[in-house]
Image: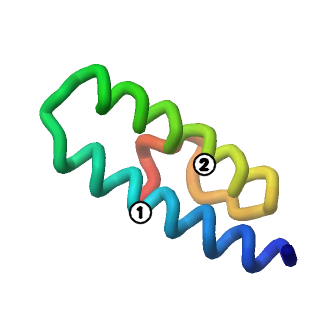
Amino acid sequence: MKPQQMIEKLKAARALIAEIYDGTDLPQIQSIVRHADQNLHWALWNLGEVETLRPDLDT
């Protein structure tokens, strides 16, 4: 898989994670998906997609 394809899929995964986070009021699930989002953020970072230092500040 080419880097641009990975970037697109990682961004799509982050969008899905955001939907789950926003769609639940269960703190344990929110914590788990926030951790997943952080890992996706760092994967993008390592592919050169630098948005912000902290994933919770991404727009």
Q: Left or right: 4 with respect to 11? A: right
Q: Are marks 2 and 1 in contact (CB under 8 Å)?
A: no
Compared to 6, does 37 lie above or below? above
Q: Amino acid at mark 2?
A: His
Picture coordinates of residue 23, whole percent (x, y): 17, 49
Q: Where is the N terminus found, in terms of image quarters?
A: bottom right
Name the residue rendered at 60%, 48% in the picture.
Answer: 41
Marks 2 and 1 sit apart, C-alpha to C-alpha, by: 11 Å
Q: Residue lying farthest right?
A: 2
Q: Mark 2 sits on what residue?
A: 41
Name the residue rendered at 68%, 44% in the picture.
Answer: 42
Q: Amino acid at mark 1?
A: Ala
Q: Left or right: 12 with respect to 41? A: left
Q: Nearer the viewer, residue 29 or 48?
A: 29
Compared to 5, does 49 lie above or below? above
Q: Earlier in the sequence, mark 2 or mark 1?
A: 1
Picture coordinates of residue 26, whole percent (x, y): 18, 27
The mark found on residue 35 in the picture is: none
Name the residue rendered at 69%, 69% in the picture.
Answer: 7
Q: Left or right: 22 with respect to 52? A: left
Compared to 4, does 20 lie above or below? above
Q: Mark 1 sits on what residue?
A: 15
Compared to 32, does 20 lie above or below? below
Image quarter for residue 39? top right
Name the residue rendered at 42%, 35% in the picture.
Answer: 34
Picture coordinates of residue 58, whole percent (x, y): 45, 54
